[in-house]
Image (cartoon, rainbow, N blue to C red):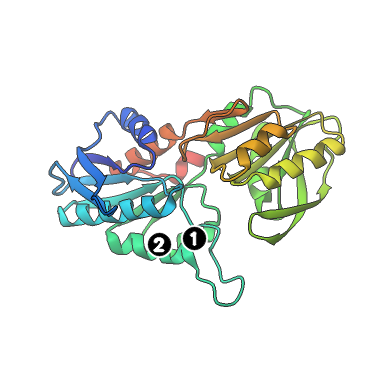
Amino acid sequence: MYGSIKLLTGNSNPTLAREVAEYLGVPLTDMLVTRFSDGEVRVQINESLRGEDVFVLQSLCPPANENIMELLLILDAIKRASAGRITAVIPYYAYARQDRKDRPRVPISARLLADLITTAGAQRVVVVDLHSPQIQGFFDIPVDNLYALQVLHQYLQEDAGKDTVVVSPDAGGVERARLLANKLGSSIAIIYKRRPEPNVAEVLDIIGDVEGKRAVIVDDIIDTAGTVCAAAELLLARGATRVDVVATHGIFSGPAVDRLMKSPIQEVVVTNTIPPKDFPKLRVVSVAPLLGEAIKRIHEGESVSSLFT
């Protein structure tokens, strides 16, 4: 039996960490995560963790390499403090799109990151909407992959109905779109696209009927927003009356915000797995209750998967 819950956080998403702590009714553990004068990460935990059930919340969002290093050093410090159990809570898992060797002489970065996290001391991992579910197999420790569709559905359900069509932006996201469509009682459409190189998507065609309907594009990540903006243009050309976008992780790198503001997309809904950038079309829903409930169930030895059944 482990001791009480201890919740720690690095600098990647302190607002989300505070929301999770409030949900759990526990304070954030006193810890220092700063930089030495040469830029190296400095970690110092100011409370005893011996025998405790320790959870580290750290989103591996940009600057990803900085946040990864913080997580690894925090895990190592906890391991050396004789914690009872160490769980890494990673709302956004970096390098997830590099999950296979798709061309010669490239790394499988998602696997390497899994090895680093395990070696640093994590005994369990909690993530939200992994880009590729098979990444769970890169770990030799338990992994809980939480689904944000639950909180996104709660936001969308008031305006959804038979005049709504849920759109998958590619073939790989069909299952995600199907689940959301089932929850909303809506139809589904699929966009067929080709990606000639990273961060460049060529939208080609739509499978399904979108004429006269509100189209809701659902994805796990919005990065440069090229895919969703091109998809929105095509959907309107095919007769959709309105286009909205929902996604779990809003990275919004490079020209993303400018593209979204100039696009015909009316509303962009994301969760706070990554600290959100503020622009008029953006709506943010919190995954803090989802993460908090998962942490509570892990601590009490209850089922996490039953959250989604």
* Identity, as a three-letter code, of the amino acid under mark 2: Ala
Q: Residues within 10 Å of mark 1 (few under 14, many from 20)?
A: many
Provide the secondary structure element on which disc 1 rests.
helix
Residue at x 56% of width, y 45% of height: 253
Q: Position of residue 172 (x, y in %)?
A: 66, 55
Q: Is residue 113 left or right of residue 211?
A: left
Residue 71 falls left or right of residue 32: right
Residue 1 appears in the picture as rendered: no
Q: Quadrant of residue 158?
A: top right
Q: Nearer the viewer, residue 21 or 124?
A: 21
For the point 41% across and 33% down, the residue is 288
User: Which residue does the image show at 82% across and 35% down from the upper left?
Assistant: 236
Which SS class for mark 2? helix
- Which residue is under mark 1? 135
User: Nearer the observer, disc 1 or disc 2?
Assistant: 2
User: Residue 295: x, y in percent?
Assistant: 34, 41
Mark 1 vs mark 2, CA separation in Å: 8 Å
> What label sits on residue 114 in the rendered view?
2
Q: Is residue 123 above or below residue 249?
A: below
Circles 1, 2 touching at the beta carbon (< 8 Å):
yes
Residue 215, picture quadrant = top right
| Residue type at numbered disc 1 | Ile
**First in sequence: mark 1 vs mark 2:** 2
Horizontally, is 64 left or right of 227 in the view? left
Q: Is residue 184 visible?
A: yes
Q: Residue at point 53% right, 29% down?
A: 278
- Work out whether 197 lies above or below 206: below
